[in-house]
Image (spheres, rainbow, N blue to C red):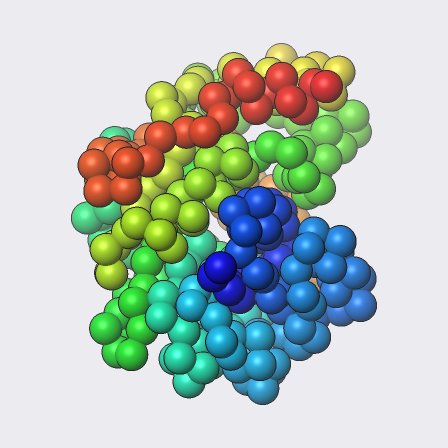
Amino acid sequence: MSTAFVTGGSGFIGGALIERLRAEGWTVRALARSETAAVRVAELGAEPVRGDLEDRRALEEGAAGCEVAFHCAAKVDDWGEPEEFERLNVFGTQNTLDACIAAGVKRFVHAGTEAALSTGQPLVNVTEDAPLRPDSPIFYAASKARAEQRVRAANGDGIETVVIRPRFVWGRGDTTLLPELIQLVESGRFRWIGGGAQLTDTTNVENTVEGLWLGATKAPPGGVYFVTDGEPVVFREFVTSWLGTQGVSASDKTVPTAVADAAAAVSERAWRLLKRPGSPPLTRLAVWVSSKECTLDTTRAKRELGYKPVVSREQGLAALSG
């Protein structure tokens, strides 16, 4: 029986991963930064280890005796202070890597993102060879690119590393993205940016976990892989169906992409200069996700890992409707 250490175990992806690992017969330890998180991971069947990404002692304690570490913890947000993204996503990743190396962990599987490749341009049938963009003007994207650089640089330095990149993770257990979208619709603030006719890839959380599992059990050291639900879908069609699982219908109102881009830039500048609390009403990352094509080539994952979706998009939507 193998033992794994999971960061971000009380979150969306990490929680589903713990369930999968326990179903596979693995023993799991999970970092928990609060009592609420500790209770959550314990309910999922993992042993909680109290601490956070800045707590080297807790990280080493959690990783001790583990063959594999899964790094799922991150600040995933379209707004925030650049120092916070750097502290959690970049230095938090480095701290976790260092602790795992010190603890003798054999393999480190990093939950990456296609956002690490983006500076706002469409991503069209991109492969894993596309360059990382640590120069992105979006703090989340830039910090995830720098985090992945550190993970890939560590491969062979006392540890094997693998990066799994899902896109637009959705599905059972989502307590953030879908509820926020529903709130936008119900408040009357939802708009289709540019009409929403662009293609996008998505990755159900179960398919994300399948990718992480294969990253731990089948991937060659140093591998980087996109994992998705299979074929891309028209963004508007997917979001309409996704909202429909909760009995919510989106407005038909649209706003031109150029107008949304300008409004996001102005909003961000005002929030930054005036130090306003909370998030701007519109951010550049939200505009990118909602208006730019993002299609990913999963040939490498299929060829090297035998990856294929374990849940179809239709099955995932049906599960949310139940």
Examine the image and state in which quarter residue 178 appears. top right
- Judging depth in this view, the residue of 183 and 10 nearest the camera is 10
The structure residue drawn at horizontal position 62% and vertical position 58%, both measured from the top left corner, is: 9
Q: Which quadrant is the C terminus positioned in? A: top right
Relative placement, left or right, of 196 versus 216 is right
The image shows residue 274, relative to residue 206, as above or below, that is: below
Relative placement, left or right, of 291 versus 221 is right
The image shows residue 202, relative to residue 143, as above or below, that is: above
> In the rendering, at what x and y percent does residue 87 appear?
53, 74
The reply to whether residue 272 is visible in this rendering is: no
Examine the image and state in which quarter residue 125 appears. top left
The image shows residue 307, relative to residue 94, as above or below, that is: above
The reply to whether residue 62 is visible in this rendering is: yes
> In the rendering, at what x and y percent does residue 106 appear?
36, 70
The structure residue drawn at horizontal position 70% and vertical position 52%, both measured from the top left corner, is: 44
The structure residue drawn at horizontal position 66% and vertical position 60%, both measured from the top left corner, is: 46
- Judging depth in this view, the residue of 84 and 54 nearest the camera is 54
